[in-house]
Image: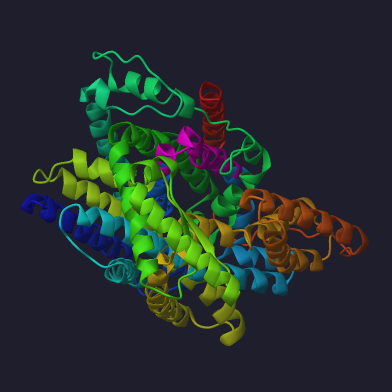
Amino acid sequence: MKFGITDITVFIAFIAGVVGLGLWKSKASAKPGSDSAADYFLAGRGLSWWLIGISLIAANISAEQFVGMSGSAAGSIGLGIASYEWMAAVTLIIVAFAFLPYFLKSGIYTIPQFLEVRYNPLARTIMAVLMMVILIGVSLSGVIYAGALAMRDLLELYNVHMSIAAACWLMGIMAAIYVAAGGLKACAWADLIQGTALILGGGVIAYFAFEALQAAPVASLTPAAGITPALADSASGLERLFQLNSTKMHMVLPKSNADIPWTALLIGLWIPNLYYWGLNQYITQRLLGSSSLKEGQKGLVFAAALKLVIPFLIVFPGLIAFNLYSTDMADKAERDFLSVYEKAVTEPASTYVFTCHDSWSVKNIAKAAEINAYNLRKQEQAKTQNLKLTEKIQAQYKTDSALGLLIGKLIKPGSGVLGFVLAALFGAIISSLAAVLNAASTIFTMDIYDKYLQKNAPHKTLVKVGRVCIGVFVVFGCLVSPMLDDPKFGGIFKYIQEFQGFVSPGILAAFVFGLFNRTAHGITGVLALALNPILYGILGYAMPQLSFLDRMAVCFFSMLALMTVIGFFWRLPKPVVFESNTTMDTKTSYGALIAGIAVIYATVVLYMVFR
């Protein structure tokens, strides 16, 4: 299949409109004669609740969610993957009323600045450095790579071929243009279109998926493992969804589950959630740009309500993709496995050995015997040369292909719908990338450059530094991100989550402890930030069987315990007071509080329905 001219027109018009609106609104709303750091980095502290809410969703949802979540739903996790969204809804409410009041009252530009208010300048610097490493080395390169991979695979369905490197540079340059020119305000207004299109695009995919499921012959559908449904030809798409996937419609998974055991719902999953939504600069920067505390709180509650909807637009279509296209997923898994094998055969230095899927080996006896012979040769080579071999296990299904299969098979070119859906997905990737670039440049400029390289620099200088940073960072990200295509990284989701654990438990522990204990000496925060990466690394090396969520939980509580002990013996002469350093309205929105309670109640109901 090939793109129709209408699809190409819609795609180009959408992207041009997004970039154009962001640049126009950032310039049109700038104060005459003003080029201040607050205008550039925090949108002049003038963001309204609806802009904040949509922007939070657009910055958050990217290729990892659409590709990764739909793929996880098609695989063994099923609806359980929705915990990343529904628990985020509760987390956003906590951030709105427990974290945000302190942040806005203090008048900070960056989250690390708050640690200087509570602890000392060293704590701020350590957190700034840690966040720079994660934002540039992990988040930026990870978002670019995941987005490039998704777009490359989708475009190949329509005979548009693009290398990973080319896709990385295309997205990086697109994001850098409007972020460097317009700052956070450009990001927020661009996000308004992209976030709305993202939700509509997800709805379009879900609509076509349910239609296809209802129309498909019963004999052609594949149920989840262990199910033998008695499907009626007249059953609706929704009825078929639940009948075919009853074993996957559970949010509370067994303790033995390697991805999201029920124990992670109690402790482990809350740590990355609270860090990500409350302390991660590329998310919280939109909150720091709020025009008032009420607007920020309403924006967070709005985003939380949208989070309850996202799984129905991503997870349910993923389940349907397996029911409709399990054969295609199996073929894709076979092709990928054999591709890696054939490449390894031609590379004498390769250290891979391959384990074939049992059912595949029965159907492909000759090829399986060839692979086993190759493995024996590699094992002998490993003994003589003292090499460490890496096992590559053939997946039964390539479930990450779920989104691509839905789009490629259900949305036909020519009407413009395909162009809109692809533009929405492309825009989602650009939004996340722009958010990371904006956050990283803000932290470097305000926490490193302004504090150590040129103290109290003029605002115009700070803005110039921020723009230069964006250019440098995007070049770095585009150079590094194609390297993540190497299988040794174990997949982009694992890469991002594993490395986040080096910083998030320590940062969260420092913030939680600092808010509740105002008398402990500043050294407590410094130790939590500095020792967490060491402990996390030791646990990963000594206990590799421990999931990253459980490692994060151990680190978090270990840091809290350490801070409590040290704070008991080493105290400040008087408690820290979080004084107000802003002229904005910092009164709580009680309407938002009531709506937030309703969102939490709705989340609990969803967990009870799909327990």
- Give the farthest residue toward the left: 5
Q: Would residue 72 be counted in the magenta stretch?
A: yes
Residue positioned 83% across, 65% down in the render: 521
Seen from the viewer's position, the closer of residues 438 and 343 is: 343
| Residue 433 visible, this angle | no
Q: Position of residue 434 (x, y in %)?
A: 38, 63
* Residue range (magenta): 70-94
As drawn, 601 above or below 451: above
Residue positioned 76% across, 54% down in the render: 513
| Residue 258 visible, this angle | yes
- Would you say 396 lies left or right of 407 here? right
Residue positioned 58% across, 33% down in the render: 253
Q: Position of residue 384 (x, y in %)?
A: 58, 75
Q: Position of residue 596 (x, y in %)?
A: 54, 34
Q: Quadrant of residue 313?
A: top left
- Give the farthest residue toward the bottom: 454
As drawn, 425 above or below 601: below
Residue positioned 49% across, 82% down in the render: 458
Q: Would residue 235 be counted in the magenta stretch?
A: no
